[in-house]
Image (cartoon, rainbow, N blue to C red):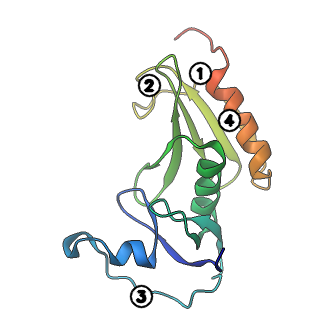
Amino acid sequence: MSAPVAGVWTPWAEVLCRNCHDALKAEAKREIKWPDPEKRLGDDQGFCTACGAEVWVHEDIAQLTRLLKVLGTGELEQTGGMCSALTIARADGGTVVVTNMDGPVMIGIFHKGEWGEGQEAAEYYNLPLSTPDDLAAAIIRVAITQSIGEKK
């Protein structure tokens, strides 16, 4: 595998390497000053959601792309501004939401239709930001299948 390259978190909730970004239609492109393809302050290694290339991107986004890759399911979402979440559908119609901005990795389990509606999670886990990806993914898998209490 080649060395990671600079990546960008897009307003449409994708992480793109330079090649995938530059392949977009002109009206969808952002004017980006691409840095040297070296790790920048605050960056960590993640993956391009279009081609899978290793990229350097802001550490919270990088962690979500790695979890997405380990889990093999879910999608990245923008949660306001350039904030991010990884969401995974549950068999009962609910949603597992993983966020990691400004503190711990938070895994929330929402009843059907309650994610994005300002409702509080029915259940949640808080993990240290330094939790290894494979351990965090194992806990997310539990959240995808565990029973949750009735709606309040």
Name the disc covering residue 140, or none: 4
Q: Against 4, is 48 above or below?
A: above
Q: Nearer the viewer, residue 96 or 116?
A: 96
x, y percentage for residue 48? 51, 65
Kindly indicate whether the residue at mark 4 contacts the one at mark 2 (C-beta within 8 angstroms).
no
Residue type, numbered disc 3: Lys
x, y percentage for residue 89? 50, 30
Residue type, numbered disc 2: Glu
Kindly indicate whether the residue at mark 2 contacts the one at mark 1 (C-beta within 8 angstroms).
yes
Instruction: State the quadrant of the N terminus.
Output: bottom right
Q: Give left or right: position of 43 versus 8.
A: right
> Badge 2: few (under 14), some or many (20 or more) residues near its Cα, within 10 Å?
some
Q: Earlier in the sequence, mark 1 or mark 3?
A: 3
* Residue at position x 39%, y 30% in the image: 117
- Figure label count: 4
Q: Earlier in the sequence, mark 3 or mark 2?
A: 3
Kindly indicate whether the residue at mark 4 contacts the one at mark 1 (C-beta within 8 angstroms).
no
> Badge 1: few (under 14), some or many (20 or more) residues near its Cα, within 10 Å?
some
Cα–Cα gap, marks 2 and 4:
18 Å
Q: Nearer the viewer, mark 1 or mark 3?
A: 3
- Residue tagged 2: 114
Q: Nearer the viewer, mark 1 or mark 4?
A: 4
Q: Earlier in the sequence, mark 4 or mark 3?
A: 3
Where residue 2 sits, quadrant-wise, is bottom right
Q: Give left or right: position of 37 versus 49.
A: right
- Residue tagged 3: 33
* Residue at position x 47%, y 27% in the image: 119
> Badge 4: few (under 14), some or many (20 or more) residues near its Cα, within 10 Å?
many
- Which residue extends farthest front? 1
For residue 101, say whether it is visible. Answer: no
